[in-house]
Image (cartoon, rainbow, N blue to C red):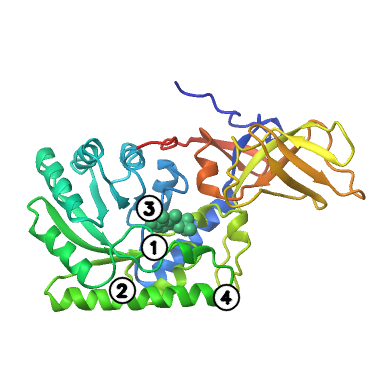
Amino acid sequence: MAVPPPASVGDPLDWVDTPALILDLDAFERNIERMAQAVGASGIRLRPHAKTHKCPEIARRQVAAGAIGVCAQKVSEAEALVDGGVDDVFVSNEIVGARKLERLARLARRARVSVCVDDPQNVIDLDQAAAAAGARLDVLVEVNVGGDRCGVEPCEPVVRLASDVKAAGHLRFAGIQAYHGHAQHLRSVDARRSAIEDAIERVHQTRNALERNGIDCPTVTGAGTGTYPFEMRSGVYNELQPGSYVFMDADYLRNDWSGFLRFEQSLFVLSTVMSRAAPGRAVLDAGMKALSVDSGMPMIAGWPGVTYLQASDEHGQLAIEPEVAGPKLGEKLMLIPGHCDPTVNMHDWYVCVRGGVVEALWPVSARGSGS
Ligand SMILES: Cc1ncc(COP(=O)(O)O)c(C=O)c1O
């Protein structure tokens, strides 16, 4: 059942019901343009990650600005994106389980779909699913470049899996994924650069090993918002997959961005003060069910001396410094989420605002735990 949006087009921001996910369209559009120009000028491909926004409308805008397609993390996201008009989706993740593989293979009949593997059994299962669906899937071998999440070790293990993919009748070996998740939020620029230098070295060795075995590696993809300039200039990555740059969040704002292009905060959660029962204390109607706190508490835009202290299910407790009056009962505050992706996943609608007025309402079509 469709959930009605918390606002109507033309409403002033102040009239939006809360908690609501707010998108500052001017900042958002500048972010899209800035990344597209930077990567476009480098001559390599941009494939932004749609796990951040889960919204075909946003994916279509990224493609219109120059991206070759988008990434998704789950089959349900890929389905929503293809349904919403995106015709090239890379599932930058391992997909396991017969039902999901069947859906993925069926999707490959409607759009260009590619996926990661890091296990020979998964190659066999993918091939069978593609055969049953009468589809052909592009497959990238994921290589562990330091994140120690999914991915086989560099060099020989990648060669073995790539050979399996090449031998499978309904799969095509499309390259390698070398994404370093841990590096993205290392605070100092030097720490991020050094982590990616290590990753680049592992990618070089792996590509050489593939070459020695006569295996062509058309795509080397990876990178997030925190490190993309290093992969971009590596000479070995030819596709980048940053996601958070469209919105940014409090966690990313804590990184040192010296020498980097700046992306602006465009995503907020609008929240109302629902209690001022005691001096020095205020409570908002946005708690853990409106904001993800896995990467720290939200920041409050435009309220010096007021801090978001802790979140419970439906409440956000604020601390107000003694010399500050703080917000009144019923006042609306803009919060900068700690982590953008899981925050978006809690909402049904983007309330898109320009100049203080609601200009559009976009559904978060791929939201939910999904599959
Ligand atoms: C495989 C992969 N690629 C790209 C990204 C995008 O990273 P970011 O949102 O930090 O730009 C992520 C985020 O978790 C990811 O898991």
Label number found at residue 203: 2
Q: Single out the mark in the foreground, 3 or 4.
A: 4
The kind of residue tagged 1 is Asp
Q: Is disc 2 in contact with disc 1, using a CB cutoff of under 8 Å? A: no
Image quadrant assignment for residue 284: top right
Q: Secondary structure at mark 4?
A: loop
Horizontal arrangement in the rendering, residue 330 relative to residue 106 (left or right): right
Q: Nearer the viewer, mark 4 or mark 1?
A: 1
Type of amino acid at the residue the image marks with label 3: Val
For marks 2 and 1, the one nearer the N-term is: 1
Q: Quadrant of residue 332?
A: top right
Marks 4 and 1 sit apart, C-alpha to C-alpha, by: 28 Å
Whole-Å distance between the Cαs marked 3 and 2? 27 Å
Q: Residue 350, how many percent across, how many down?
A: 54, 38
Q: Secondary structure at mark 1?
A: loop
Residue 235 visible to the viewer: no
Mark 3 C-beta to ligand 1 under 8 Å:
no
Q: Secondary structure at mark 2?
A: helix
Disc 4 crowd rating (10 Å Cα; few below 14, some 14-19, many 20+) is few
Spatial CA span between label 4 and label 2? 25 Å
Q: Tag 3: Cα neighbours inside 10 Å, few (<14), some, or many (≥20)? A: many
Amino acid at dot 2: Val
Q: Residue at x 16, y 66 (%)?
A: 160
In the image, is residue 17 above or below residue 132?
Answer: above
Q: Earlier in the sequence, mark 3 or mark 4?
A: 3
Q: CA distance from mark 2 to mark 1?
A: 15 Å
Q: Amino acid at mark 4?
A: Gly
Q: Which residue is mark 3?
A: 63
- The residue tagged 1 is 148
